[in-house]
Image (tube, grey):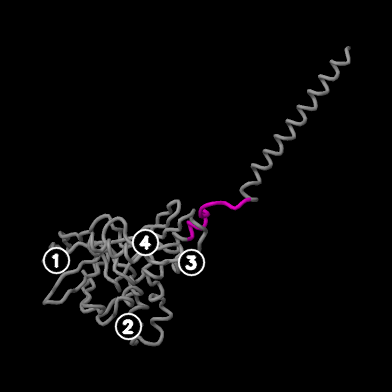
Amino acid sequence: MPAWGLTIRAGARKSAANLLKRSLWLIAAFLLVPHGFAKEGMDRNARIDIIRGLLREVAVTKVPLPRGKRGVHVDGAGKLDQADAQKEVRTNGMAMKAGGLAEITAIHFKEKALVIEVNGGGRSGRKWYQHIEIDMGGTVGPVDQPQDVNEEFGSSVTVDFGRPLPDMTVPEVKKVLSNVLDFERHAPTVLYSPNLPPQIKQAIKDHKVIVGMDRDAVLSAKGTPDRRVREVRDGSEQEDWIYGTPPHVLIVTFDGDQVVGVKQY
């Protein structure tokens, strides 16, 4: 066989070996990239922990929250865009006053933002059912209805990071939201150990509501209500918290921050 034929075959084998070596390096690099380089975006487990830790959590609003889809915006350090928030309130009206109760009802993970919806979000108002009837031992009677049923509005808080969502814990998210929402007020160990009268402490333990409780005590006893209704009665704005569905309905009436009436149907 000519010498040049041996040279061609040897060169082909060497090229194939080099190609195989390069392929193995590429495969190894592909497999190692997720571990060897910093990833972008929030980890799936972090998202699950935030949903578990925050969904249905109740806080108190520190600032007025506007109606509408935009809500208010804070940056990654928790600084509130005051001008934008005031503009939204002027344009769309107020959904919630400062000092109101806000329940987290949805959490949305965007590419560079975390959107926290409270009280159903800002897309629309929610009306309480106006035609509820309860079977009372053979007769059917209507639940006492207020003359004017007001719409209840929710809102939202958007945390703009300006970069892919970082991994965060629940306490870290609460800290970022702390200029808008106060979560600390509802820690039972802080609120109810020294100051509450014995009868209210016992009612909380029994998961009951009695006249004289404040909103925090009712939240500890019964949790977040299914519906809320506000109306003006005798010149005073009152709010009903409604728990349950017919035939078992509990209506708790607040005047200001104090329970003034409890009706169990």
Amino acid type of the residue tagged 1 in the rendering: Gln
- Residue 29 at x, y percent in the picture: 67, 42
Which residue has dot 1 on it? 145
Nearest to the observer: residue 255 or residue 97: 97
Q: Earlier in the sequence, mark 2 or mark 4?
A: 4
- Residue 157 at x, y percent in the picture: 36, 61
Residue placed at 34% from the left, 74% from the top?
221
Residue 134, by quadrant, is bottom left
- Residue 245 at x, y percent in the picture: 25, 62
Disc 4, SS: strand
Which residue has dot 4 on it? 73
The CA distance from mark 3 to mark 4 is 17 Å
Amino acid type of the residue tagged 2 in the rendering: Ile
Q: Is residue 226 above or below residue 163?
A: below
Disc 1, SS: loop
Amino acid type of the residue tagged 3 in the rendering: Glu
Which residue has dot 2 on it? 200
Q: Earlier in the sequence, mark 1 or mark 4?
A: 4
Nearest to the observer: residue 132 or residue 217: 217
Q: Earlier in the sequence, mark 1 or mark 2?
A: 1
- Closer to the eye: label 2 or 4: 4
Amino acid type of the residue tagged 4 in the rendering: His
Residue 13, by quadrant, is top right
Which residue has dot 3 on it? 172
